[in-house]
Amino acid sequence: MAKQPLSDQAFQRYSRQVMLSEWGEDNQSTLANAKVLIVGCGGLGTAAGLYLSGAGVGQLVLADDDELELSNLPRQVAYRESDLGSHKAKALAAQLSALNSESRCRVVARRLSGMSLSLEVSLADVVLDCSDNMQTRQAVNKACTENRKPLVAGAAIGWQGQLMVFDFSRTSSPCYHCLFPVNEEAAPRNCQSAGVVGPVVGTIGNFQALEALKLLMNQSQSQSSFYQLDGKTLSLRSMKVPSDPTCSVCQCVNTEVPDADLA
């Protein structure tokens, strides 16, 4: 699809990022034609959604089956008290549309799984895993691996945050299952059971948005990377995710599907 030149209004709106030499008008047009799937509209998804919409991503698919509760508000700051009891994905779509009417939102008001998850992943350019449970994280990772879609996964608990970036679209890559080879936690740990600091969640969500934008513009340098944020010390540690040669997810796909560069 040929890229359309930016309108005068769009150029004015995005002028502060377009002026960056690594960004420019071409990349802004790329964002306008991009589709990002956000799985989970809690603290991570709301933070990421705000910045992706603000940056001018053309379409955001918001998937969540939960309703907004009072205890969500300290960290899910895209919502308002008037949204209490509302469906999160629908309420977030309304907020993002109010922020940027040019960034279209499509709501998936249910928990994605199986074929529906695979279909939504296949239609996206980048997938953000903003969920809060291991079962969903593993399912999203598997769908992204099988469909060769870039994945940016985030998590936060207590004062700690995690960010993982996998670009399955380019080459053979380790995956989330290589690092966490369990499908379900024996004792699930999430915000409800263990507590969390709101700004830590928002920071990881913003990191997810940043990496998604870089992936869409082919400028990410974080493929197969794991980052650990300590909110108490403001330290950020990083490591490359090792590939597990026995991984039942990515190794199976990598042996059956040739690398994109070799196709």
Image: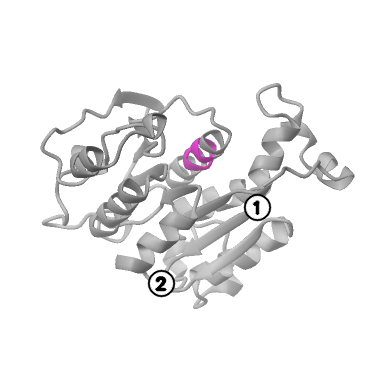
Instruction: Return the x and y of residue 232 as percentages of the image width and height.
Output: 37, 32
Examine the residues drawn in magenta and state their main secondary structure.
Answer: helix
- Label drawn at residue 58: 1
Q: Which residue is mark 2?
A: 65
Q: CA distance from mark 1 to mark 2?
A: 23 Å
* Viewer-proximal residue among 93 and 81: 93
Q: Is residue 40 visible?
A: no
Q: Residue at x 31, y 46 (%)?
A: 145
Q: Position of residue 129 (x, y in %)?
A: 39, 51
- Secondary structure state at the residue bearing disc 1: loop
Of tags 1 and 2, the one toward the viewer is: 1
- The amino acid at mark 1 is Gly
Q: Nearer the viewer, residue 93 or 43?
A: 93
- Whether residue 183 sits left or right of residue 237 in the image: it is left
Q: Amino acid at mark 2?
A: Asp
Q: Is residue 244 visible?
A: yes
Q: Residues within 10 Å of mark 1 (few under 14, many from 20)?
A: many
Which residue is most to the bottom?
Answer: 85
Q: How are the colours assigned in the image?
A: one colour
Tell me the element at label 2: loop
Which residues are drawn in magenta? 207-212
Residue 13 within the magenta-colored segment of the rendering: no
